[in-house]
Amino acid sequence: MTTSATNRRIQIKPLTSIIGAEIEGVNLSAPLDPQTVAELEESLVTWKVLFFRNQRITHDQQIAFASNFGEVTPAHPIEPGHADKPEIYVVDAQEEKALFGHGKERPAYAPPRMTAAGWHTDITFVANPALASVLRGRRRPVIRR
């Protein structure tokens, strides 16, 4: 299912027949040229979710990458974003577990969380919802079987 064309600068590897593709040949820590941005926009429309593996980028580089696709907004209209980078919303699984009762770390006063598990978007109520979100995983979860 590999998509390739001689005029493309990036490699697109679909992960399913419907949604999701892995993108290779793009360095997210460097500025992107207009042709690469156009190819990524086309890929996003086609595949809906794009994965860029093994990219070590900073908050500033993440914001710069996102700005290729339009105005970068504050991370959340109600919840505060990162103290120095309001465009970044940090989700810490350990902190979430402690606050919302997933495991032994739950404080006695905290009721179990009854909302969505993990990251989701619920900002569709704003006048102009974002086109997309740029998520960056810093640590992979450990899956125990």
Image (tube, rainbow, N blue to C red):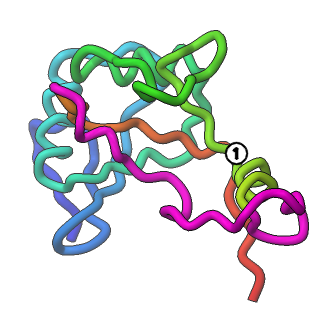
- Where is residue 130, by image quadrant? top left
Q: Is residue 122 above or below residue 80?
A: below
Q: Is residue 6 above or below residue 59?
A: below
Q: Which segment is the magenta one?
A: 101-127
In the drawing, does residue 80 fall left or right of residue 14? Answer: right
Residue at 66% x, 14% y is: 83
In the drawing, does residue 100 fall left or right of residue 116? Answer: right
Q: Is residue 137 above or below residue 47?
A: above
In the drawing, does residue 11 fall left or right of residue 127? Answer: right
Q: Position of residue 107 (x, y in %)?
A: 88, 58
Helix, strand or loop: magenta stretch: loop
- Where is residue 134, by image quadrant? top left
Q: Position of residue 43 (x, y in %)?
A: 17, 45
Q: Which residue is mark 1?
A: 92
Asked whether 30 or 93 is in front, the reply is 93
Q: Position of residue 126 (x, y in %)?
A: 23, 30
Q: Secondary structure at mark 1?
A: loop
- Where is residue 76, by image quadrant? top left
Q: Is residue 95 above or below residue 100?
A: above
Q: Amino acid at mark 1?
A: Asp
Q: Quadrant of the N terminus?
A: bottom left
Residue at 24% x, 41% y is: 124
Q: Residue furthest top?
A: 84
